[in-house]
Amino acid sequence: MSQKLRVNIVGIGPGNPDLLTGEARQAIASSNILIGDKRMLAAFADSSKTVYDTIKTSAIAEIAAQAQPEKDVLAVLVSGDVGFFSLAKTISGKLPDCECIRYCGISSLVYFSSKLQLSW
């Protein structure tokens, strides 16, 4: 049986790298290929990782198909909640030969509530 490519689908929360969860930070650190839009990738511009500026499902599927499961780990950076309206749902079903693992970020509702000093 061939090894499946690992794809970390990482919710970046409000977009501030300081607000990444520990798990999200670790998932990004363990990935050698980063995929996302320019805003999401900006915090990782100085890294030694291969970076792809795209959120197109077909492009992500092509990048995954060309990756080598024995040496590559992809991190797809997504905004929003990885369990709700998100690119995470769209791409998970489009990468059949991959092991997709979701890492949540801080949701906008939680972040907004904390800034307003409100319970939600």
Image (cartoon, grey):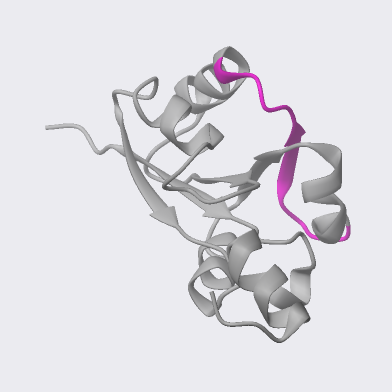
Is 88 on the left-hand or right-hand side of 99? right
> Residue 55 placed where, x, y %?
67, 27
Which residue is at a point 79% across and 48% down the rendered structure image? Answer: 41
> Residue 74 placed where, x, y %?
53, 44
The quarter of the displayed image where residue 2 is located: top left
For the question of whether residue 94 can be seen, the reply is yes
The answer to whether residue 54 is magenta is yes
Is 34 on the left-hand or right-hand side of 39? left
Image height check: is 8 above or below 109? above
Give the camera-side residue of 26 and 13. Answer: 13
**The N terminus is located in which quarter?**
top left
Image height check: is 87 above or below 81? above
> Residue 61 placed where, x, y %?
50, 20
For the question of whether residue 20 can be seen, the reply is no
Image height check: is 108 above or below 9? below
Which residue is at a point 42% across and 33% down the rendered structure image? Answer: 89
Q: How many marks?
A: 0
Magenta segment boundaries in residue numbering: 46-57
Give the camera-side residue of 64 and 24. Answer: 24
Is 120 on the left-hand or right-hand side of 114? left
| Extreme residue in the bottom direction | 117
| Extreme residue in the left direction | 1
The answer to whether residue 24 is magenta is no
Image height check: is 22 above or below 50? below
Which residue is at a point 46% across and 20% down the rendered structure image? Answer: 65
The quarter of the displayed image where residue 37 is located: top right
Which residue is at a point 56% across and 82% down the rendered structure image? Answer: 119
